Image (tube, grey):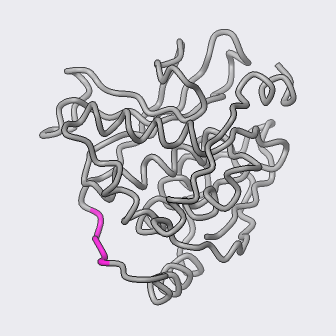
Amino acid sequence: MTKDEINKALKRPIKESSQFDNLIEKPNNEQKQLKKGNTFYSVSVMKFWVINFYWQVAKLSKVLLGENLEETTKKIHSFLFGNIQYQADGTVQYIRSPSNSWKNRKTGIDCKSYSVFASSILANLGIKHYIRQIRQPSFNPEKFTHVYVVVPIDQETGSLSKGHYVIDGTILSNKEPIYTVKKDVFMEDNLPHVGLNGVGKKKKTTAKKETSKKEPKKGKKSAGSTSKIFPFM
């Protein structure tokens, strides 16, 4: 499938959603261009982005907390699918913070940024989860072409052996796609928590300094590697 065909298949009408604006911190839209890398490098950056920017949706996370784990995952998926448009990345791959995704929700984001958003909400709620990337038999089967979040039912150990819930903001059904190979990256549930009141400017400055000093580990280059530019916040 081409980029245009994917966009046509996954576009959806989104809600007006202004009632959530005051629950999500404002981005500064700064971009940081990182090294070329394969999909494993992309996932390492996704984890880094969650650790640095999960606080942007601290207030929203409380609204999406359900009565139990299953309800919480359904509410997060419904929020992402219904309020943020899909738009496949092209040659340049974007990994957006939650704030940047919200700012660009009408233009659209792709599976990587949906996953960062979902992971950030779960991190605020202290819910163990994984970022899962997969190879799909029906689409470029030799490459990892999709990423989403899985939440283990066993929250005590984080093991997936007892089953899991899926959060995939790209599709309405939220059913796990068929895959031939999967790679999971565990997201810790013990991130530091910060009480937010207002725009949280002090925290933004701190995150910016930390990012300038530390960069995700460089992944192995492949023939299909592309230059990636990442909106900072």
Question: Could you say where residue 82 lies in the image, as x and y percent from the top left?
Answer: 56, 38
Q: Residue at x 71, y 70 (%)?
A: 32
Question: Could you say where residue 110 lies in the image, as x and y percent from the top left?
Answer: 67, 41
In this rendering, position of residue 132 left or right of residue 219: left
Q: Residue at x 44, y 36 (%)?
A: 149
Front position in the image: 196 or 117:
196
The C terminus sits in image quarter: bottom right
**The magenta stretch spans residue 192:** yes
Secondary structure mainly formed by the magenta segment: loop
**The magenta stretch spans residue 121:** no
Is 159 drawn above or below residue 52 in the view shown? above
In this rendering, position of residue 63 left or right of residue 182: left
Q: Which residue is at the far left? A: 156
Q: Residue at x 58, y 59 (%)?
A: 18
Is 204 drawn above or below residue 193 in the view shown? below
Q: Residue at x 66, y 77 (%)?
A: 28
Question: Could you say where residue 212 lies in the image, as x and y percent from the top left?
Answer: 59, 80
Number of disc labels = 0
Q: From which residue to which does the magenta span run?
A: 191-195
Question: Could you say where residue 100 lies in the image, as x and y percent from the top left?
Answer: 64, 63
In this rendering, position of residue 169 left or right of residue 66: right
The N terminus sits in image quarter: top right
Front position in the image: 108 or 220:
108
Q: In the figure, residue 170 lies in which quadrant?
A: top right
